[in-house]
Amino acid sequence: MGRTVATWRMRGESRIEEWRRFYRTLRPQDRLAYESMISATRSRAAACGMIPNVDPIEPILLSMLVEVYERISQIEKQIERLGDE
């Protein structure tokens, strides 16, 4: 008997594919940012799959927020190091 419920990864990829027209209309520098956010979501697929949600938007956005927070924290640390010099 086959799987009756799509995996999170399948649902997430389906949602990302729905955003394809949005992606194509972005400026080149915005496309790079978008691709980075999508990559952040894919790299956190295991965590996303732990959210029992039919709509994949919530784990996608959470993954993106974690990525942004991580980058901000790294920048803050770099600034602090520059201030200590």
Image: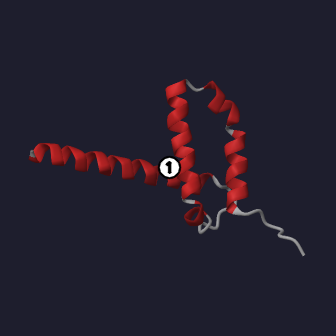
Residue linked to disc 1 = 64
Q: Quarter of the image for the N terminus: give it.
A: bottom right
Residue at image point 16% right, 43% down: 82
Q: Quarter of the image for the C terminus: give it.
A: top left
Q: Nearer the viewer, residue 25 or 42?
A: 42
Residue 76 drawn at (x, y percent)? 25, 47
Name which quarter of the figure residue 35 lies in. Answer: top right
Residue 67 drawn at (x, y percent)? 44, 51
The correct choice, above or below, for 57 with respect to 53 in the image is: above
Residue furthest out toward the right: 1
Lateral position of residue 4 relative to residue 31, left or right: right
Q: Residues within 10 Å of mark 1 (few under 14, many from 20)?
A: many
Residue at image point 69% right, 35% down: 20
Q: Amino acid at mark 1?
A: Met
Residue furthest out toward the bottom: 1
The correct choice, above or below, for 65 with respect to 27 in the image is: below
Residue at image point 59% right, 69% down: 50
